[in-house]
Image (spheres, coloured by chain):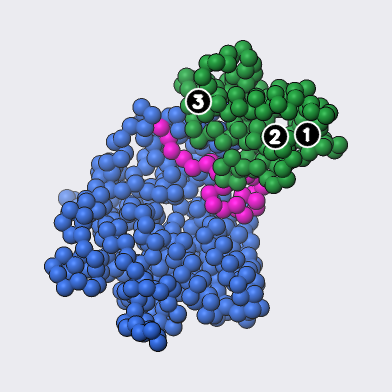
Chain colours: A green, B blue
Amino acid sequence: MATDELRSLYQEIILDHNKNPRNFRQMPDADYVLEGYNPLCGDHYTIYLKMNGDVVADVSFEGAGCAISKASASVMSTVVKGKTKQHVHELFDRFHDLVTGKHTGNVSFEELGKLAAFAGVSEFPARVKCASLAWHTLRGALEQRKETVTTE
Amino acid sequence: MAVTAAIETKQLPKAFDVDAVRSEFPILETPVRGKRLVYLDNAATTQKPRVVIAALRRYYEEENANIHRGVHYLSERATDLYEKTREQIRRFIGAGDAREVVFVRGTTEGINLVAATFGRANVRAGDEVLITAMEHHSNIVPWQMLCEQVGAKLKVAPINDAGELLVDELSNLLNAKTKLLAITHVSNALGTVNPMKDVIAVAHSAGVPVVVDGAQAIPHQRIDVRELDCDFYTFSSHKMYGPTGIGVLYGKLDLLNAMPPYQGGGDMIKSVTFEGTIFNDIPYKFEAGTPNIADGIAFGAAVEYLSSLDWQALSIYEHGLLQYATERVKEIDGVRIIGTAREKAGVLSFVMEGVHPHDIGTILDQEGIAVRTGHHCAQPVMQRFGIPATVRASFGLYNTREEVDALVKSLQKVKEIFN
């Protein structure tokens, strides 16, 4: 069987979202479309974003990559819908702290919800860029950036 | 009876003693993540035997001085040792003259040197440079840059679904405008061994000189540049059990003599005034500045080590190991081998259905197994096979069947996790 570290990295929720990614579709009427690409890995996604004023009305993604990057994009798409821009930025920071091992405990795992599944990534420094690609791309889309985002 | 038996024993090829070889490589004893290291990333870089590590240490402890200019004892000694390496390499690759051995940083610089000197002098607007579809980025980008600069065209000879070069198609692409063929001897991503001697003969019959990327070939087979009749052959020390930061560009004497210098600086000149400079003779004309003396001398130790091996036995051993690995990995459900050429060396590239290579790499790493995952600096090869990346297990002379078994066992674990 797998080691504990591996089990904490490849949690059920991550394997599930990798196999059956949510909101995995094009969005023809998206307000913002941005590419995220890590050329060394080959992780390559397009994030589609529709806004209703300051609120994320809909988010979807397409593309291919490793389980960590795909599950991260999928879980992200389920947690940011209906959130304000400000709230998405807060989630970004929490997620970033979590996967880089800076999670202080001020925020409970309950508050993190599904994102907590990515806590194991911090034990695998080489995979942080995979987990954070979709999040950086979403932030870029919110900031109305046009150039392809990379976390390598 | 006894005499006959003795003769028969003598005729059998001696078995390769992998345990003896392994004991020369200290890093193989170093645990990784609490596990025994299974190092299967030899196409990226090989581990170093004791003699190489000792040569580096000895150089800095007992021999360090700048070369080619001092009159003092250490400078003369360091110069002798450095130039001895040049002679060892000449012998190792079967070159006729040590002046044909130019020291560079590695294969990448070897190719760039040819592009920047031979290329600039001989490739003009409207000309063509021919490469193949299985090249490493280092044998694509320097030619793209050259073609861009002079207005020439880059042509690409195709490969088939097995990853074999289509020599007839390559032959059809050769014409009066073709100024150079740049081709890898062994593909780093697929393991394909190109029929180098035939390809070179085909190119020469069209009057086209050939530069061979030998980085992945030279650790696996004996190279004889005169038998190949290649015009240039370039390789890296660190992929053949020597230190990083040094490699060789072999070039035919008359070609090197006719080429303009590469970089300007010390050591590559005979005399300098503000009005002009008289360049040094080959190979020094291409070796500006203080070279990588320490690694050069230790490279000599690596070549000496390789020269001491029984290459017939080694070749049978390595071939058998790759075959064994191929068969075992192929048996795993959902695995597709990328690169199934009839002639292969050292490389087993594959993908697994439903699992990205990086996830496989992370899981193998937890077991102490080092493989490479990604596009292997050969993105056009990945595009040719319609995949973003592969897992690449690449073998060296110290790898064993037990290590292949460990790889297979861990790949089963990958399947367990991703079911």
x and y percentages locating residue B134 in the rendered image: 57, 57
Against B208, residue B154 (above or below) is: above
Against B364, residue A3 (above or below) is: above
Amino acid type of disc 1?
Answer: Leu
Amino acid type of disc 2?
Answer: Leu
Return the residue at label 1. A49
Return the residue at label 2. A138
Q: In which quarter of the image is residue A118?
A: top right
Instruction: Please state the extent of the stretch shown in magenta in the rendering.
Output: B368-391
Q: Does mark 1 fall on the same chain as mark 2?
A: yes
* Residue B126 can be seen in this image: yes
Residue under the point 45% across and 33% down: B365
Amino acid type of disc 3?
Answer: Gly
x and y percentages locating residue B308 in the rendered image: 25, 57
Q: Which chain carries label 2?
A: A
x and y percentages locating residue A51 in the rendered image: 81, 31
**N-term-proximal mark, 2 vs 1:** 1
Disc 2, disc 3: CB below 8 Å? Answer: no
For the C terminus of chain B, which image quadrant?
top right
